[in-house]
Each structure stands twice: as C-alpha cells, then as structure tokens.
Amino acid sequence: MSPGTLYHHFPSKEALIEAIILEDQERALTHFREPLEGVGLVDYLVESTIAVTREDYAQRALVVEIMAEGMRNPQVAEMLTNKYHTIIASLVARFNDAQAKGEIGADVDKEMAARLLLATTYGVLSDSSSAENARHVSFATTLRTMLTGLLKCNSAS
C-alpha cells in the first residue's frame, strides 16, 4: 500500500501508529479478558507466550518498529504507555483471580509481575529465533519455571 493510500485513511503518521497500537492492544486483551477456566494460570501464560512465536513475522516486526518509534517520539511513547497500562490492568485482574484460587502467592506484587511478564512477552516477540526456540521442550519448561518463581506459586500450575 502506498503512503498516499495510507494517508487517505489516516490523517497523520501518528494516527496510523495509534490504530496499529490499538489493534495490537486488542489482540493482547483477547487473551486475558475473561477469567481462566479449566487451565492453570502458569500453563496458560506459557501457552500464550508460545503462541506469540507463531504470530505473523511481519506483524511482530511492525510491533517492534512501533516500540522503537516510541523511544524517539513522545506522542507515540504516550500511546504505548496507555496500551501497556491497559494490558497490565487486564493481567492484574487475572492475577487477582489466580490469587483468590490460591494459585499464586498472597504477597506477589501483581502489577510488577504483570510488567515483567509484558517485558518477557515483548522480548519473545522481538526475538527472531523465538519460533525455533519455542519448538524445544526446554523453552516451555524454563518459561514455566521462571513464571512459577515470579508468581510465587507453591507448585507449577
């Protein structure tokens, strides 16, 4: 699609970026909108992280490019901050559910855990080798161990 066509639909580069950010936010929220039923939190988080490695490579690259733009452009940085806050709030809600079920420790800093999970997810998303790495059993095993520790689980869920 040519830049002229894009700007026919979006009045500015920032408006286009905002639309992409909101679409990515919605994709992330679909994973955490509802309480989890029938699956442990850690297992769900491991599967969700592995699912990121299967997402379209061009889409993943676009997300990384926008994150880089946020480092240079304060307006984009603010949009990303709003996105992160929304996703973190959704994760914290799921952590509250898991805490009520006794799946995670009572003294977990849920907001910090959500921020670290988000950082881990974006790290996996930006790693060009993550799809290959995720094919190895050790990827899921190591991620599960890391999340179990982060969330102070009594045992792997």
Image (spheres, rainbow, N blue to C red):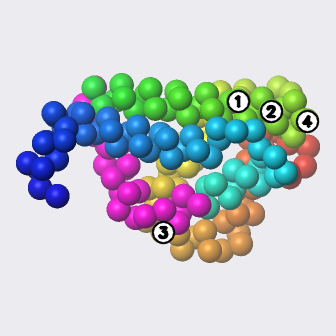
Type of amino acid under label 4 = Gly
Q: Which kind of residue does numbered mark 1 sit on?
A: Ala
Is residue 71 in view from this perspective?
Answer: no
Q: Are marks 1 and 2 in contact (CB under 8 Å)?
A: yes
Predominant SS of the magenta segment: helix
Upstream in the sequence, badge 4 or badge 3? 4
142 on left or right of 56: right
Relative horizontal placement of residue 70, taking residue 136 as reference (left or right): left
Q: Earlier in the sequence, mark 4 or mark 1?
A: 1
The three-letter amino acid code for the residue at tag 2 is Asp
**Label 3 to label 2: alpha-carbon separation:** 33 Å
Residue 89 lies, with reference to residue 126, above or below; the image says: above
Real-space CA distance between mark 1 and mark 3, rounded to the nearest whole angstrom: 31 Å
**Is 63 colored magenta in this rendering?**
yes
Question: How many residues crowd mark 1 within 10 Å: few (<14), some (14–19), many (20+)?
Answer: some
Q: Which residue is mark 1?
A: 93
Nearest-to-viewer mark from 1 and 3:
1
Query: What residue is disc 2 on?
Result: 97
User: In the image, what residue type sits under mark 3?
Assistant: Ser
Q: Residues within 10 Å of mark 2 (few under 14, many from 20)?
A: some
| 146 in the magenta segment | no
Residue with the mark numbered 4: 102
Between discs 1 and 3, the one toward the N terminus: 1
Say which label, 2 or 4, has the lower sequence index: 2
